[in-house]
Image (spheres, rainbow, N blue to C red):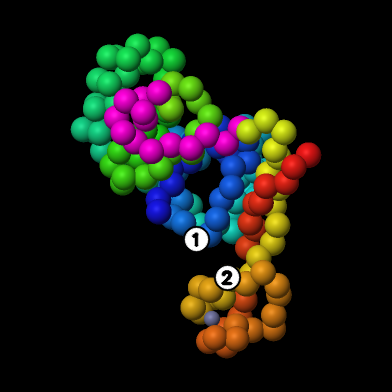
Amino acid sequence: MRYVLDATAIRNGMTLSGEYEWYMTSSVKDEISRGKQAKDLNLLVDISIKIMDPSTPNVERIEAKARETGDIGRLSKTDIEVLALALEIDGIILSDDYSVQNIAKALDIKFKGGAEKGIKEVFTWRWRCRGCGKFYDEEMPDCPICGSELRSVRKRSKQML
Ligand SMILES: [Zn+2]
């Protein structure tokens, strides 16, 4: 499964698992790097996020739909690129932005919001084999399957407050 992250997703600390493919536009990356969220981005370095920008035709499709729904004035250039990228790679958008979700709905792009009342997501650690890629919940000297070294990866899990 491919997920496309927007800045609100990072801000609200959505669950990011190493089992999926993560994508981000360069504009979202810039937005996060500039702001207070830089440290959040650093928290995510263990999860490999591919930086990719959408093609012009997909950007134009999003803009056309946003004009139709009236969301165009509420969407930033970054929002539009996030949507266009999800369209392009058949990805699932992680966003809490209402207008982004609205356009996603209108174009049958899958999306998930992250802000759930009373639930805060926190990191837990797991270990992943550098060789075969298998995940383990506890640290071991090496991978029982292939013998390669394990590295720690952060995993977010839900925790009730
Ligand atoms: Zn292994």
How far is the residue under mark 2 from the one under mark 1? 9 Å
Check disc 1 and report its element: helix, strand or loop. loop
What span is colored magenta in the figure? 102-115
Question: Relative to 123, does residue 127 appear above or below in the rendering?
Answer: below
In the image, 79: left or right of 88? right
Mark 1 — residue?
Answer: 19
Q: Are marks 2 and 1 in contact (CB under 8 Å)?
A: yes
Q: Position of residue 24 (x, y in %)?
A: 44, 43
Residue 113 seen by the camera: yes
Q: Position of residue 37 (x, y in %)?
A: 64, 37
Residue lying at 31% horizontally and 45% vertically, measured from the top left: 90
Mark 2 — residue?
Answer: 135
Question: Relative to 131, does residue 111 appear above or below in the rendering?
Answer: above
Residue lying at 31% horizontally and 33% vertically, measured from the top left: 108
Q: Alpha-carbon neighbours of circle 1 within 10 Å: few (<14), some, or many (≥20)?
A: few
Amino acid carrying mark 1 in the image? Glu
- Residue 83: which disc? none
Q: Please identify the quarter of the rendering in which residue 39 is found.
A: top right
Question: Relative to 67, does residue 5 appear above or below in the rendering?
Answer: below
What quarter of the picture does the C terminus occupy? top right
Q: Position of residue 41 (x, y in %)?
A: 60, 45
In the image, 106: left or right of 25? left
Question: Relative to 70, does residue 116 appear above or below in the rendering?
Answer: below
Residue 53 seen by the camera: no
How many numbered discs?
2
Is residue 105 rendered magenta in the image? yes
Quadrant hosting ligand 1:
bottom right
- Viewer-closest of 102 and 82: 102
Which badge, 2 or 1, is on the more N-terminal residue?
Answer: 1
What quarter of the picture does the N terminus occupy? bottom left
Residue lying at 48% horizontally and 37% vertically, measured from the top left: 112
